Every structure is written in structure tokens, then in C-alpha cells.
Amino acid sequence: MKKWFSAVVLVSVVFVPLVALAVNPAITSFTVSPASGPSGYFFAFLWSLENAFGSSFLIPCIQGIKLRYSNGSALACGTRIASQVSANDGLGIKIINIGGNQASVTARVFPKDSYGKDYDAGGQTVYISVSPNTQPIEKFTTSTTTTVSGSPVTISWSSTDLDGVNLSIECKPEIKASSPSYTAGLYLPCGKPAFQTDLSKSGSLALNFNNSSIDTLPYTLTLFPAMAPGVYNAVYPAAITINVASDVVPDPVVNYFKTSAPSTIDSDRTMPISWSTENTQGVNLKIPCAEGITATSSKNTSLLLPCDSYAFADDNLLPSSGSLDLFLKNNGDSLRTVTINLIPAFKAKTGYDVTRSKTINVDVRSRMFAQTPTASPTVAPATTVAPPPAPPKPLPPVSKPAPLQKPAGAEVKPVPTAAPEEKFMEPAEESKKKTAPKKQAVVKNADEIAKLLTENKYVETAELVKLNSGLGIYDVVGYRDAKLFNAIPVRLKIKIILDAVDGEVLSVKFPWWSFLAKY
């Protein structure tokens, strides 16, 4: 009996203090300040321990929530952060909410026992309310707000708190987009994240657009913040709208093609031309072939322009708008009409749009009969000796010459004032032979003819057509400007019969409609 009592006393003395030492560790307080705040705010977590040998801190993972230490380094969610501090402890954490919605974040602290193990039953929890970041993509720009057909556009973006972004393009049937960073030869998919792997959180991307509409269309590009790989915040994306130009090339337009030269010019005189076009690579000239006509230009005065084909090579076109001097030479024996065609070149393909061509017509005098006001007239020597011709009889200027007085012994048929076709009244040759002595013809040159007729106001320019050497009679064609109905500029063609010996005008024939013109 005494032995049993002694054993009880011994156990009590030895083990009772050990039982007293085995007290569970505890968290006496755990607080956070503030209890709510915006994304990116630093929250201060403080806790006190009792009978503990350290602690562990834990914030469970929530999609869209990122954690950082005060020095900016990442803090892993869902991982216990151990500390050996056995009394009061704390931690400052930056909580970033890129999830797009208000988030309730849970934080827990667990005390450690004497073996360094977490005593979960003694843990405590606090809750923090974190507002979302409403601009997770801080900057999103484009190199241009309006594209140019065939030219790439560069978009750029930057962010701080994100790990990546992805691009989504608007769905419009007229517009297709591609990028060198995407699969070669394929268009970007629309209406969803385009890239299988997220783009970096900051960077740039080149895009090409094709717009099959004839109009410039607005087009929206959207960057989505990545909350996790392949998971995106659709609440606060970044978007930008650009105007995508049409890739449909409109037809060429010729605004004007004109010259400041008169409708009739002397051979080899300067003929300025000017033009204005749109939607073209440039323009070319085409001059149909005309007998005796050659042409050069101020682009290269020593090079003859080809006729009936394009004047300039395809790689040496005239500009879309500009001016040029032409020099037309008439080596023939009469007035020639020259047609100058301006033909625009297509802007986006090879060749010319002949349906949009414009034309200028000009009459070029023969070099043989070009007017030379400063030159002195000369008389060609006669084949036989004859008395010098009498000076021309001055004729009074008239607005519309009536039939002139016939020379002695010659009958001149009256000139009708209107007729369906132009006929000239020849002198009655038999009567002339009977009533007047035969004249010796003195062949006058072109300068004398022109001077004679222009001085007497019949015409402004004159050209020899035919010489009847037996009678010394010239057939001459002259021209003068007039106004039809006193308003519309016209060019009258006048036919004249002229005595080569004494310079007398035997007949003048105007066009039948000349009575409608004032000159």
C-alpha cells in the first residue's frame, strides 16, 4: 500500500509540469488596414501570437487578383509565407485587381507550435474588399487614324500590372486584316482573341487592312487584359477606332486639258499645253499622223515625238498634273489640222484609260506660207521680159465683200450670198480674150499674196492653191476670224480669184452661212 502511494506521488511530481507546458499556440489578434481599398493599394496586415514559435501567412488565389510585396516583387497566392517571429508580426502587401469586378480577398494567419508546424485550428481570418483597376491597359495608340491603301498600320500599348494582352478585331465583311506576326497568308480571325498565345503586356504590332468597299469605313481594334493565360477581362478592355481607306481604285479623272495657243498657229511655234488629273500614275500624249507634220516637246526638244503611238515610255510618263510646250512643224504645202490626245494612265494597274482621254485640235500653217511680218516681199523673175506690174489697186475694207468690179474685157459671175455648197465664179475666158489684150503672167510668191490680201482686209491669212499660168490667175484660200450670231467664235474659209499681173481681186467667195457671222 505504501509502495503504490509513493508511485502516484512520483508521477504527479514528474508529469504534472509537462502537462502544464503543452499549451496550444494561439493568434491573439489579427487585423488589416484599411479593410477596403482600390486596386494597387498597400494593405497592412498585423497579428499577435501567444505560446507560438512563429506563424504562416496565406492569401488564397482568386482569378484576376495579383499580390506584390512592398518592394514590387511578386507574392505567390495560395502559398503559406512562414515567419519565425514568435510575438507580434506583420506584412505589407499590394493587392491588384485586374478581374474587372469588386473582389473580396481572404487573408489567414496560422501560429506554429514548438515543433515548427502550423497549428491550423488556432488560425484567424480577415477579409479585404478591393476595387478593380478600370484601366489595366494604360496606353493604346495607333500610328495613324486613317489608313492608306497598301500601307501597314502599327498599334502600340503598355501596361504595368498585366502579364499579357490579346487583340480582337471587329467583324466587317468588307474589311480583312492580317499581320506579319500571324500565320503567313491567313487573315486574323474577328470577334474573338486573335492570337493563341498572349501578346506581351507592353509592345507593338503591325497590321495590314484590305477594304473592298468603295468607301472609307470605321474599324475598331480591341485589346483585352489577360487575367490568366487564355482568360481575359472583358469589362475594362482598351479600344481604338481607325478609318480604313478603300482599296477600290477609282477610275482616272481628267479635270482639264487646255492650251493658251490660238486655234491656228504658225509652223514650229510654241504651243503651251496644261492638264490636271486625279487617280492616275501620270499621263501620256498621242498625236495621230498627219502629212508633213512633225512634233517635239520641251521635255526633249531634239527628240521627235512618234505619231499614232504613245509619245512617252511607260516609265517616263508626264505627271498627273502639269504643263508642257509642244512644237508642231508643218512641212507640207497647205494648212494641216493636228489632233493632240491626252490619255491618263491607270493608278493601280498597267495601261491607259482611253475612255477618259481629252483632245485638243489645232490648225498648223504650212512653213511655205507662214506669215513673216518683218520680211520684205520679193518678186520672182519672169520667164520673159515684160513691163513691171502695176501696183495693186487699193480696195476699201468691207465687212462682207460684194462681187467686185470686173477687169476690162472679163466677165465675172456674181457671187451668191448663200448656197448649199461653195462654188466659185470663174471669169469668162472667151470674153476676156476678145475684149482685152493677153497679159503676161507675173508669178507672185506667197508673201506678196498674203500681204496683198491682208492689207485690203479680205482675210487675215492666205495660201496659194492653184495658178492658171495661161491667164496669170491665182486661186487663193484665205481665213479670217468671226463671231457666229455675234457670240460664237468661228473661222471663215474664204476663196478668192486674183489677177497675178495687176493684183486685182476678181472674185471673193464666202461660206453660204457667212451672213450669220460678224467679222
Image (spheres, rainbow, N blue to C red):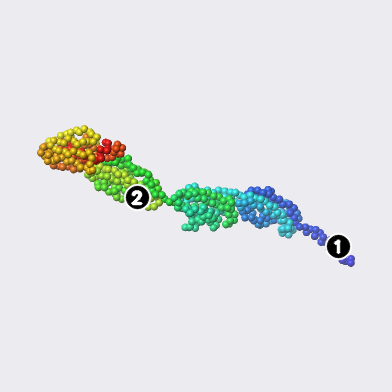
Q: On the picture, is 373 further left or further right than 353?
A: left
- Can residue 302 be seen by looking at this rendering? no
* Marks 2 & 1, CB-CB < 8 Å contact: no
* Residue 240 or residue 153, whichever sits in front: 240
Task: Estimate the spatial distance between the alpha carbons at disc 2 and disc 1, rounded to whole Å.
Answer: 126 Å
The kind of residue on which mark 2 rests is Val
The kind of residue on which mark 1 rests is Val
Point out which mark residue 78 bears.
Answer: none
Q: On the picture, is 112 further left or further right than 311?
A: right
Q: Residue 417, image x and y in percent? A: 22, 38
Q: Residue 54, image x and y in percent? A: 72, 55
165 in relation to 515, above or below? below
**Residue drawn at x 25%, y 44% as measured from the top left:** 336
Q: Residue 9, image x and y in percent? A: 86, 62
Q: Quadrant of the C terminus?
A: top left
**Residue drawn at x 12%, y 39% as measured from the top left:** 431
Reading the image, the residue beneath label 1 is 9
Point out which mark residue 354 bears.
Answer: 2
**Residue drawn at x 84%, y 61% as measured from the top left:** 13
* Residue 430 or residue 213, whichever sits in front: 430
Label 1 CA crowd tier, 10 Å (few <14, some 14–19, many 20+): few
